[in-house]
Amino acid sequence: MRLKSLCCICAIFLFSSVFVSAALDLAFVGTITQTPDPASAGATVTFSVSFRTNGGAVTNMKITGGVDGTQLFTRTYASIGADLTRNDSFNWTATAGNHTIWFELDPNHTGGESTYANNRIAKAITIGG
């Protein structure tokens, strides 16, 4: 009986270890970059970001971005393989003053990630007049 129990435990452990994969975690790599930097009012500014699919693949993943809480950009990636890095960007016509630029990965939390705490990145900038 002990041998049978031991075999069952080993089989369960082996089966579960084969089919359990690392949890997906979408994460930004580095910070938001700005071109040109510095910029002045009226200039077309490009904000860029890199992100990675750590531990798993993702399908129909959205990335959004904007300025001062207003969404100006959205893109949907049909499929991104596991452990790959992608780059994305959007353009904005600069206005004078202090602004907050942001990007967010999987804003509707549909990717099945282990954590969503690192899905948003922001950067404060100042545009001269």
Image: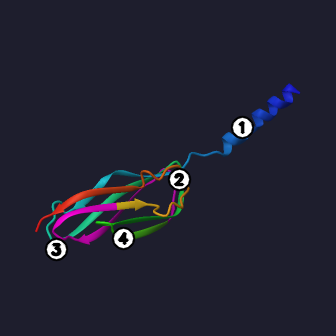
User: How far separated are the C-alphas under marks 2 and 1?
Assistant: 24 Å
Q: Which mark is residue 43?
A: none
103 magenta-colored: no
Quarter occupied by residue 110: bottom right
Classify 118 as above or below 46.
above
Q: Which mark is residue 113?
A: 2
* Residue sitting nearer the eye, 68 or 16: 68
Q: Which amino acid, mark 1?
A: Leu
Q: What secondary structure characterizes most of the magenta part?
A: strand
Which tag, 1 or 3, sits closer to the chain's start? 1
Q: Which amino acid, mark 3?
A: Gly
Task: Give the residue number, with chain letter if any, for mark 1.
Answer: 14
Quarter occupied by residue 120: bottom left
Task: Give the residue number, with chain letter if any, for mark 3.
Answer: 42
Circle 4 — which element?
A: strand
Q: Of circles 1 and 3, which is in front?
A: 3
